[in-house]
Amino acid sequence: MSDAPSSGGPTPVPDRAPQPSVETVRGRVPVTELNSVLMHEHVFVTDPEIQLNYPHLWQEDVRIAEAVSKLTALKQAGVDTIVDPTVIGLGRDVARVARVNALVDINIIVATGIYTYNDLPHFFEYNGPKTARGNDEQMVSLFVQDLTRGIAGTAIKAAFLKCALEGELTAGVERVLRAVAETHKRTGAPITVHTNPAARTGLLAQRILTEEGVDLGAVVIAHSGDTTDLDYLRELIDNGSYVGMDRFGLDILLPGDQRVTTVAKLAEQGLAERMVLSHDASCHIDWFPPGVREELAPHWQFTHIHDTVLPALRHAGVSDRQIDTMLIDNPRRYFSGGTANGVSGETLDAGPEADH
């Protein structure tokens, strides 16, 4: 009998690979539709216990309206997506963010994780290593739940992990870093780490994540733009990570012209593909008395990059192609399962049994 295929009937067409997509507050969006992305912005940064106990200090309708106005202006400036790394420790409230997002046409990508410079919340401190529980499986399982099932009983899923290493590597900070790494390995979710360039903590974060088996190409070392130390930045990049040039407008930490020059120098070295841009601004943050933020950092607002920084970068020799790489291509790659090293990551679908 002949093994030749029959000539009758249509030739089967191979299935196309599914297009990568990412979770947002409004549901999954193809990464190709994220368009221009600011990779580190907050909608709200608050202390929920203060709001709970002193509700007269919070005006929900006023804050929602302010956020809608600021994000609408950002959309009109040419930004289609913001990445919001607000997690436990910063007052994450995705239902509140969803109320804002219902009134403004912008993609908002949210995170899971814990933001602390020192100690863990007591809930986690006494449920982990050297306790009756013995490990941080509970912390990891909650992070996985946020990524695969939804946050706080909503259908809104986190799309990335956030942790912080500001100064000393305390026991609590280290536990979060290692739990974030474990969650990344289970889900493929990328990671953003708050760091302090003055203390070179980005390198320490990279070391710990590497010890846990994380591909550093799936990691943004946030706030790297607070330094002009090109050797430090090159070391972070050579280790494989993206660097977050993400505090434009915070001139009180580093003047804007120095931030621009640093980005331009790295771009000149062919490293635009390893940088992402943002402000680390917020629609509202309750850390400061009224008016203080505006007085100390008048440029620290959402449209500063498009109004001022991009023209300055072009004047410094950064091409439009390089700007698109930082604002469009790198975020797309970060959220599509690829890495800064071009290595494909796991898909973010751990399934219903992911939080075992």
Image (spheres, grey):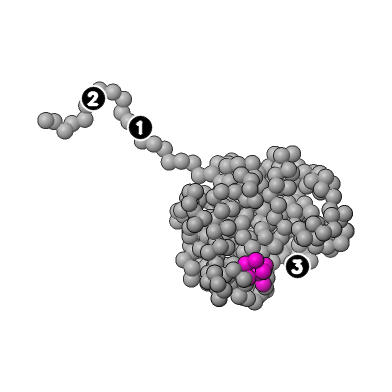
Q: Residue under circle 2?
A: 7
Instruction: Give the side of residue 66 with respect to residue 238, left or right.
Output: right
Q: Are dots 1 and 2 in contact, CB under 8 Å?
A: no
Please report the residue visible at 65 percent of the width from the left and 51 percent of the height from the top: 152
Badge 1 local density, few (<14 within 10 Å), some, or many (20+)? few
Q: Residue under circle 1?
A: 13
Rendered view: 256 above or below 147: below
Rendered view: 19 above or below 86: above
Front position in the image: 52 or 324: 52
Q: Find residue 253 and name its label.
A: 3
User: Tag 2: residue type?
Assistant: Ser
Find the magenta span and give its range: 119-125
Rendered view: 227 above or below 73: below
User: Callout 3: helix, strand or loop?
Assistant: loop
Instruction: Give the side of residue 309 with respect to residue 134, left or right.
Output: right
In the picture, residue 253 is in which quadrant?
Answer: bottom right
Please report the residue visible at 66 percent of the width from the left and 58 percent of the height from the top: 87
Front position in the image: 305 or 210: 210
| Quarter of the image with the N terminus in it | top left
